[in-house]
Image (spheres, rainbow, N blue to C red):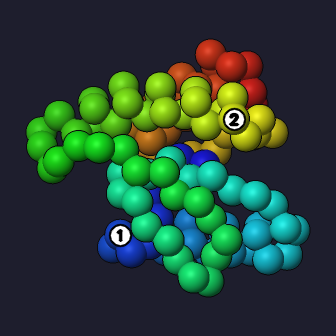
Amino acid sequence: MISPFPPQISGGSKASYYFYRYLTKEYNHQIEVLSYQRFQNKHVNVNSVALRGDESLFRGILFIVLGFFKGLILSKKFKPDIIYSKHLMSPSITAYLISKFLRIP
C-alpha cells in the first residue's frame, strides 16, 4: 500500500489507519506501507518504509522516483497480491508505475 499513515495529520491517513487495522486484525493480512516517513503504530501490524527527502518543492517528484525503486524492491521481497494507493497525487502515480511494470493489479 502506498499511502499516508498516522501520525500524519490528514483524513487520508486516518482512513488508511482504519482500513489497515481492519485488514490486519480481521483477515490477518501482512501489509507493507510505502510512505514519506518511518513510523509504527502499536494498534496496527504494519511495516512502514520511509523514503529519504526533506520538505521541498520537488518532494512529490522525489517520492515518485525513489518510491518506484523502493516499491520494486519491496514487491520482489514480499510478492504482493495487489498494489493499492489511497492518495491521489504522487503515491498513486508511484503505485500505478509499479503495478504496470510488475504486472500486479
Looking at this view, name the residue that lies furthest to the front.
77
Label disc, if present, on residue 77 of the rendered structure? 2
Q: Quadrant of the C terminus?
A: top right
Q: Quadrant of residue 100?
A: top right
Specify the amino acid type for callout 2.
Answer: Lys
Q: Nearer the viewer, residue 53 or 3?
A: 53
Q: Of the residues tagged 2 and 1, which is closer to the observer?
A: 2
Q: Is residue 104 left or right of residue 59?
A: right
Q: Nearer the viewer, residue 35 or 93?
A: 35
Looking at this view, name the residue that lies furthest to the left.
57
Q: Earlier in the sequence, mark 2 or mark 1?
A: 1
Please name the residue shown 63% across and 52% down the image: 32
**Element type at mark 2:** helix
Looking at this view, name the residue that lies furthest to the right.
27
Residue 100 versus residue 52 in the image, above or below: above
Disc 2 crowd, CA 10 A, few/some/many (<14, 14-19, 20+): few
Q: Quadrant of residue 81?
A: top right
Label disc, if present, on residue 8 of the rendered structure? 1
Please name the residue shown 12% across and 43% down the image: 56
| Rendering coords of residue 13 (x, y %) | 46, 67
Disc 1 crowd, CA 10 A, few/some/many (<14, 14-19, 20+): few
**Element type at mark 1:** loop
